[in-house]
Amino acid sequence: MKLSTLLSAAGLALASLSAPALHAAGANPFPIKYANVQWFDPVYIADEKGWFEEEGLKIDWVGEVPAAQLVPSVASRKVDITNRMTPLVLTARQGGAKLTLIAAGAQTTPERPHMQYLVKAGSPIQSIADFKGKKVGINSFGACSEYVLKEYLKRNGLDGSVEFVVLPDPNMEQALTQGLIDVGVLHSPFYEKALITRTATAVFSDYAVDDGEPGMLPYFTHDDFIKENPEVVRKFVKVLVRASNWVNQNHEEAGQIFAKRRGLDPQYAGSWSYYENGLIADGPVQWWIDYLEGIGQLKPGTQKAADVYTNRFNPYYVAKQ
């Protein structure tokens, strides 16, 4: 193929990110069953701005689903697409679930980490060394809030030294102030509120572990949904990438939109940072494969990073081919 043809194809693919798609008059939008997740999500932004509608899609909000039930909900096809941490997808695949990552999602940065480890204002806990013997609030087992902290504790000679208490993120701040837990592992926008109101202080963030490499919050779907609706998946990823890139340039407005959609106080709105163009790389996936194999949650050699995810629905990936 001539270079000019390749460049032309790449230009068309990239231009399609912002150009509204053409649809037959009166065509019904394709409904995507999607959970109302509690944490920040660019899907709220794209829905608010009408970008899914431009592509002939409609987010069919199914209501809130407990964090621990999101992966099972996609595996059972009660939800079509969602975002959740990589280890949950890997262990579900180990158990036979047919799931594939389709976009990178949020990343951990020093300025906008995935998680903050908070203590009540005035707490004597000042570092990881002070976690020994303490009660730590997490939103679920088997994911980032448990595993990343366990790894950091292990690296500091504190393996098995804390007691975990499962609490939803919205209840974590109150549990801290009431002394029900000593440390809370909070996600955005809940850690922003606690820090802005000064009811809590941050000891560190998950960027402390390998510069945040395990902090990717990817989007995934069922393999059968991909087989049955490849064009729908392509359009969803296209809109998601558009929204994620927009969030990276408009954090304040994005936080305000999220607060509006979730009924939160806008003065405490927050948002995450997103992988550029939503492209998934081996590194964050392989980190979790190695970790889960190391703790006996995955059989060694049964899963390879390249088999867990695909970028083929991402217009930026297509443009590079």
Image: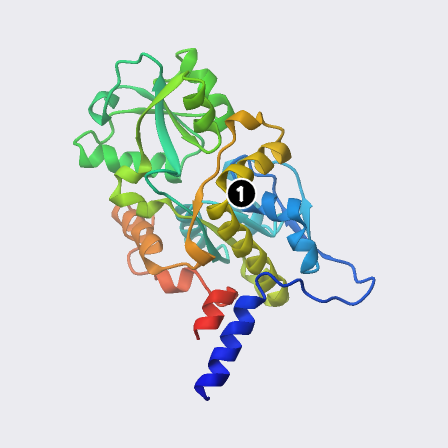
- Residue 9 on image: x %, y %: 52, 77
The residue at 36%/44% (across/down) is 215
127 vs 51: above or below: above
Element under disc 1: loop
The residue at 68%/65% (across/down) is 21
- Is residue 57 in sight in this rendering? no
The three-letter amino acid code for the residue at tag 1 is Asp
Residue on which disc 1 sits: 41
Number of callouts: 1
- Residue 184 on image: x %, y %: 38, 24
Camera-nearest residue between 308 and 293: 308
204 vs 151: above or below: above
Density class for disc 1 (Cα within 10 Å; few <14, some 14-19, many ≥20) is many
- Residue 126 on image: x %, y %: 24, 20
The residue at 25%/23% (across/down) is 131
Camera-nearest residue between 244 and 105: 244
- Residue 247 on image: x %, y %: 50, 46
